[in-house]
Image (cartoon, grey):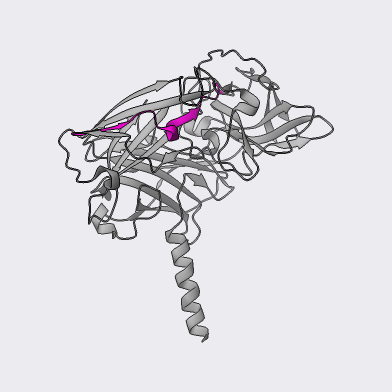
Amino acid sequence: MKICLTILSFLVSFTLIAQETYRTQIFDPKIKTLQIGVNGETMGLPIIELNSSNVLLISFDEMSHESHFYSYEVLHCDADWTISKQLNSGEYLTGFTSGSITDYTTSLNTTFLYTHYKFMLPNDEMGFKISGNYVVFVYEDNQKEKPVAQACFSIVDPQVSITTNVRGNTDTELNGRFQQLDFEVNLNGYSVRDPQSEIKIVVRQNNRIDNEVTDIKPTFMSGSKLSYINNKALIFEGGNEYHRFDISSVYAAGVGVATIRFEQSGSGYNAYLYDDKIQRSKSYVYDQDVNGRFVINMQNAGDDDVEADYMYVHFSLPTPQPFFDGMLYLGGEFNYNLLNDVSGMKYDVNEGKYFQTVLLKQGGYNYQYWFVTKGEKKASAERVDGSYWQTVNEYTIYIYHRPWGERYDKLIGVKDI
């Protein structure tokens, strides 16, 4: 009986792991500044073409100068970012499924000691056979039951073309708070028997996952063209341009920073941002941003990766009273657009303000204030920053194809608007 219960427990545990939806995130508090992107590009999504010369660079910092052994493992995922359970590694990878991270450098002249680790995919020991979504796990001492971080990326095999349009006049209102995304997919002779059942669409706004759109069907099909026009599921809150701040220097306060102080108490450099305000204006004002991204940079540094220091960044939003109908978060790529304890704002009754402190590496950052109503998962920028149809947002459309009888989702097209 005891053996049966043990086996049952293992099977339940395995099923839960297999069904997990993967997102780029950090699990070990000693790991900071996890980044994944195309090598040589300052910003951009972690997407490369199958069999191209481009490679992905994955990097992170471990907050010490101590010696650690880190390794990685790569798994294929379906369109919903769950593991492709019907594939074995030999069907999607050449070479090995895992490797050691041997490229690392300790920080130079920084108040926070850290070691910068990095590796590339594909590499001499690992290549990709098929398109689709992938997740790379990072382990310490090969403890595969306890990853310290994971990063998601995609390999696309372009087979279709996508034409797009973003407009303010939606079916729900005219020139107000929302944006309507319309697009058409031209199959270009690519064979799809039943687009309704074989094609899967994922649409993201500013690489957010809380409001991504999935499981949408064409509103019209004509020959080799699939149209997704006037689809209510593709109406997004316009939001507002992101706030930005620059902590690339410890000697002078950059954009968005009120003051920088070095605390003798041992906390090192502290950057205090200007107090933000709840948007009251009904008029949209353009401000240049990078839709939530960040870039590591230290002024006059020879190597930003190991010379940039860490700072405690203090966010502040004065309000007469807290919001009782939900939670307020900081949104942005600095926390991989996740709604968790790192991005959750706290309220100080005595000071009459929301606040949060985050340890960040020197550079330039974007952020927004996202409000999540109780019982919901989708965040809204309107409560604090307002929402305008004119806001310049970035939309990414992923086109997946699983033919009848196939065992995984191919990624056959990506369009970044």
Up-down: is 199 above or below 16? above
Residue 101 part of the magenta segment: no
Task: Give the x, y percent position of residue 305.
Answer: 48, 33
Residue sitting farthest toward the right: 350
Image quadrant in which you'd find residue 73: bottom left
Image quadrant in which you'd find residue 45: top left
Residue 238 part of the magenta segment: yes
Task: Give the x, y percent position of residue 322.
Answer: 76, 34
Left/right placement of residue 139 relative to residue 264 reads: left
Which of 364/354 is in front? Answer: 354
> Residue at the location (68% across, 30% down)?
314
Which of 72/194 is in front? Answer: 194
Look at the image and tell me whether residue 94 can be seen. no
Task: Give the x, y percent position of residue 367.
Answer: 57, 28
Residue sitting farthest toward the left: 189
Left/right placement of residue 410 relative to residue 165 reads: left
> Residue at the location (25% across, 43% down)?
195
Image quadrant in which you'd find residue 241: top right
Q: How many marks?
A: 0
Q: Quadrant of the C terminus?
A: top left
Which of 51/179 is in front? Answer: 179
Up-down: is 304 above or below 389? below
Which of 189/104 is in front? Answer: 189
**Magenta-highlighted residues:** 223-242
Up-down: is 200 above or below 417? below
> Residue at the location (51% across, 22% down)?
173
Look at the image and tell me whether residue 348 can be seen. yes
Task: Give the x, y percent position of residue 182.
Answer: 36, 27
Left/right placement of residue 181 relative to residue 339 reads: left
